[in-house]
Amino acid sequence: MNITFTRTGECTYTTQALRDDAVLLEVPSYDRTHAIPHDLAHYVVERELGLKRGFWGCVAAGALFPGIKVISGRQPDHTAARSQAVIREAGQQGTEAEVLVGVLLRILEEGLENNWPAARALLREAWKPSKPSRGPLEAEEMRRVCAALCQAQQRWQALAVGESMTVSWRLDKRAKR
């Protein structure tokens, strides 16, 4: 799946995702005030942490969250049932992704990526899943994700209004459909 982020203003953007089944989606932007679009931060965090069923993994597998619009392409049969099954299968990993994106952006904004004790405290405070899909983040892993977020942020900020950047999400073909 290719995901295109287009800068539409100083603090605004649009997102379109072209799934592997040739369905083009428009993803709503419910952005928070960060130096990087929230949906782009999701992409970076989910990719770096290998979260196969975070937001983008679910969209690639056929989930249609509220607000997502089909722009073009033929939807497969039983689209609603498929979407619900993907979201149900994702379970807590989707929530974990949202929490991790928020806390990692906070760590980056507060300049704590090289202050493991402070970053670990924020992570422990924010990330308390009852049935985690993965273990807690380690210092090196957190620094790697923050470095990738920094790179994406720099790339985003270099775009002029009207310019776009496209990233690719690889659907895990072994995941259940």
Image (cartoon, helix red, strand yellow):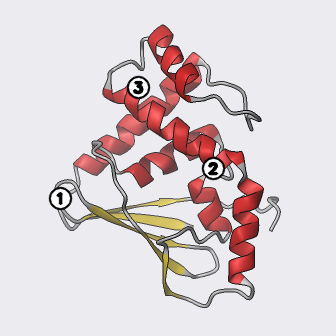
Q: Is residue 54 left or right of residue 165?
A: right
Task: Specify few, some or many for label 1: CA neighbours under 10 Å numbering under 14, 14-19, or 20 or more.
Answer: few
Category of crowding for the residue at label 2, using alpha-carbon neighbours closer than 10 angstroms: few (below 14), some (14–19), many (at least 20): many
- Residue at the spot of label 2: 94
Mark 3 or mark 1: which is in front? 3
Q: Which residue is mark 1?
A: 160
- Figure disc tally: 3
Q: From the viewer's side, name the closer residue of 165 and 89.
A: 89
Q: Earlier in the sequence, mark 3 or mark 1?
A: 3
x, y percent for residue 35: 27, 42
Left or right: residue 151 versus residue 173 is left
Viewer-side residue, 19 vs 69: 69
- Amino acid type shown at disc 3: Ile
Q: Residue 176, position in %: x, y?
A: 83, 63
Which of the two labelled residues, at mark 2 and mark 1, occupies the earlier sequence position?
2
Which secondary structure lies at badge 2?
Answer: helix
Q: Residue at x 51, y 15 (%)?
A: 121
What kind of residue is marked 2? Gly
Q: Residue at x 59, y 72 (%)?
A: 64
Do the CB atoms of the residues marked 2 and 1 lie less than 8 Å apart? Answer: no
Q: Is residue 157 above or below residue 112?
A: below
Q: Which residue is mark 3?
A: 107
User: In whole angstroms, how far apart are the C-alphas of marks 3 and 2?
Assistant: 20 Å
Quadrant into which the N terminus falls = bottom right
Place of residue 143 in the rendered image (x, y in percent of width and height, measured from the top left): 49, 23
Judge by depth and name the residue closer to the eye, 141 or 177: 177
